[in-house]
Amino acid sequence: EAGVTQSPTHLIKTRGQQATLRCSPISGHTSVYWYQQALGLGLQFLLWYDEGEERNRGNFPPRFSGRQFPNYSSELNVNALELEDSALYLCASKPTGNQPQHFGDGTRLSIL
Amino acid sequence: GDSVTQMEGPVTLSEEAFLTINCTYTATGYPSLFWYVQYPGEGLQLLLKATKADDKGSNKGFEATYRKETTSFHLEKGSVQVSDSAVYFCALSDNDNAGNMLTFGGGTRLMVKP
């Protein structure tokens, strides 16, 4: 069974640009979560998508957004990039019900 | 709100030593508890979980028991190996929230020397 896959592995942008990160969940998983792992700040919940809808978001500004497609894959978009957006962005998926989340290897976003 | 506190690292041990990484939590409901491990350059892997009080999660020689009375979920292993060197995250999922979002501790880096 293929795990959660994320692309690209690394992404380098400059301040003010826009970044798009992609995630393919495990087959059969309908929920997708995004987390930010920034140096010194630990892992912070960003967004939760389920059945194509945004269900919840963490304490992040609106320039962090995304969507979930009919095949349950997801995109995270970050607009007007700032230096402090440099981080590892992790995607996780899980099936319906009280099941654990399974994580991808992440996209490392570097802002120059 | 929910929170997880775990011991700061790094924790440095010799091979075959006993490992304990402390984790305590605060939650309004009845959370599920998890330990995830992150190897260098990789994402998080689920190590073990416990969904109710007194449950013991175990995997690959690691164990943790859900202690409601002390709100703790300490990770233990009897004999660590060099390959166990990684960052360990304790996390909770509040079962009262429909999304089961995870709240993580700050992570503990474990370094095992041969």
Image (cartoon, grey):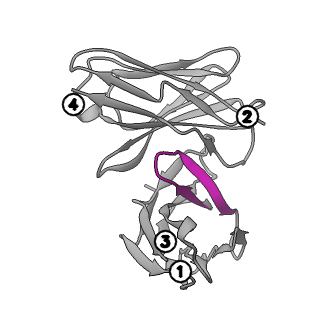
Is the stretch drawn in magenta largely helix, strand or loop? Answer: strand
**Camera-nearest label, 3 or 4:** 4
Image mark 3: chain: B
Crowding near pointer 3: few (<14 within 10 Å), some, many (20+)?
Answer: many
Do the residues bearing badges 3 and 4 touch, measured as CB atoms within 8 Å?
Answer: no
* Element on which disc 3 rests: strand
Quarter of the rendering containing residue B105: bottom left
Q: Name the residue under label 3.
A: B23
Q: What residue type is labelled 1?
A: Glu
- In the rendered view, tell whether residue A110 sits above or below residue B49: above
Asked whether the residues under the numbered discs 2 and 1 touch, taking CB atoms below 8 Å apart as contact, a structural biologist would say no
CB atoms at circles 4 and 1 under 8 Å apart? no
| Residue position for label 2 | A2
- Comparing marks 2 and 1, which lies closer to the viewer? 1
| Mark 4 lies on residue | A83
| Chain holding disc 4 | A
What is the CA distance from the residue labelled 3 to the residue labelled 1? 22 Å
Which residue is painted at 48% across and 72% down in the image?
Answer: B24
Q: Can residue B87 be seen in this view?
A: yes
Q: Which chain carries label 2?
A: A
